[in-house]
Image (spheres, rainbow, N blue to C red):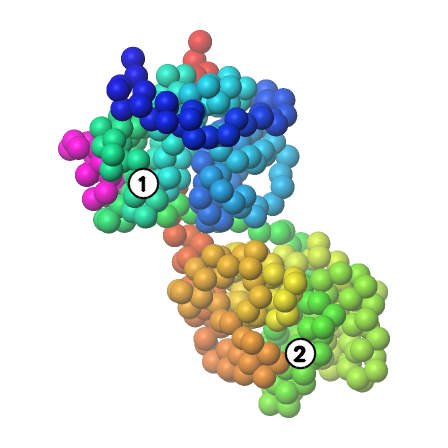
Amino acid sequence: MSSLSLIAYKALARSTTIPQTDPYPERPDGPLIWGVVHDEHSARALIHLVERLHHLRGPCSLLMTYADKAPRVPDRKGQFCFQLPVDTGETAQRFLEHWKPSICLWFGGDLRPALIAETNVAKVHMMLLSAEEHLLDQSVWRWLPSLARETLRSFASLAARDQAAQKSLRKMNGTQRDIEIHGTLQIAVVPPAANESVFTEVSNDLNGRPVWLASNIQEDELKDVLKAHREVVKINHRLALVLVAASFPVSVEARRILKSQGWRVCHWEDGDPIEENTQIILVEEPEDMGLWYRIAPLSFLGSSLRPHFNGCDPYVPASLGSAVIYGPNVRHHTSSYSRLAAVGAARIVKDAEGLTMAVETLLASDQSALMAHAAWVAISEGAEATDAVIESIQAQLDTLETP
């Protein structure tokens, strides 16, 4: 039976929300993990969890839901992304009847009492993960404090990101229930593969030469990258640049510019050899990025010096041991760059001069290696907590599969 607080909340929700159409596709067969996320970091942590489960148990689908703004995440087969339904009992029931989730992983906070209550009634196992203090501070708890306790009781487990969130949960819960601190969960990516024999061959051809990589470069960034390379080559004559354009038209333009400026170029897709006097390796196939991120200890990630392109994912090069340089226009991946920059794994530059200085400084010392190590630590953070969550999910899914 619903408490008076929940009844009052549902009545208010019905009177203040707009009816919502359910635009859902057909539910896929098999286990379906439902996750509630609040930003790019939690979305990527959720995707990593499901990827791990897929490798451990076989195919499973992911339903990702969010409150206000859809996270920017790669499209994947068996992955659905929708805004949370309005928080009324009727809408929640329709949502649950359609999707029939196997388990619910609720990240951060911003709790929806009606939806959570109906999920509990449907006997869906729920876990609150990486709770954050500011996301738990909801006005509804001030006038219905008992509703907070009832909402939290619907979760099988509660985990806080830090001590402040743990304190908030204890205050809301009103009991001595165990609330662990597990920090953030791991957001590791599956890096692109590299052919080991090709990697060995390229490494031998470069013969210990210093290398930096400029990837996803737009046409109006070409001159900045080439200017930086020309300046650093004056100091380090053996330096090689791996240049990867953002698109085929940019690659065509790059060929023209490189020829007009007299660079000694290896056109990788043409089968050119990498020789001792090669200054630039022009790569036109993004399928080879797993190779070049491993070859280069330092990567400038383009589509970031000028507006309108909004950057590219920094976790891929970071996961392959490459330190990251980037421009100021990375709106689509701000939280990822900020996280890497905060631990010293990435450095921002504003123009060609800044790029020149960064490449020169980082390649002339052990700084790029230190940055790459910091990136690995950041990406590995939360691995132990993620393992524990996966173990708990596995146990719950096993109970669902037991006749």
Horizontal placement of 148 versus 375: left or right?
Answer: left
Q: Residue furthest left?
A: 176
- Say which residue label 1 marks: 138
Numbered marks: total: 2
Q: Which mark is residue 43?
A: none
Q: Indicate whether 317 appears above or below 357.
A: above
Q: Indicate whether 283 appears above or below 237.
A: above
Residue at the image point whose x is 44% and y is 44% from the top: 38
The image quarter containing residue 228 is: bottom right
Q: Position of residue 155 (x, y in %)?
A: 32, 28
Q: Secondary structure at mark 2?
A: helix
Q: Position of residue 35 (x, y in %)?
A: 46, 34
Horizontal placement of 295 versus 49: left or right?
Answer: right
- Give the residues drawn in magenta, as a range: 167-182
- Say which residue label 2 marks: 224
Q: Position of residue 156 (x, y in %)?
A: 31, 27
63 vs 173, nearest the viewer:
173
The answer to whether residue 118 is seen in the rendering is: yes
The amino acid type, in three-letter code, at marker 2 is Asp
Residue at the image point whose x is 37% and y is 39% from the top: 110
Of label 1 and label 2, which has the lower sequence position? Answer: 1
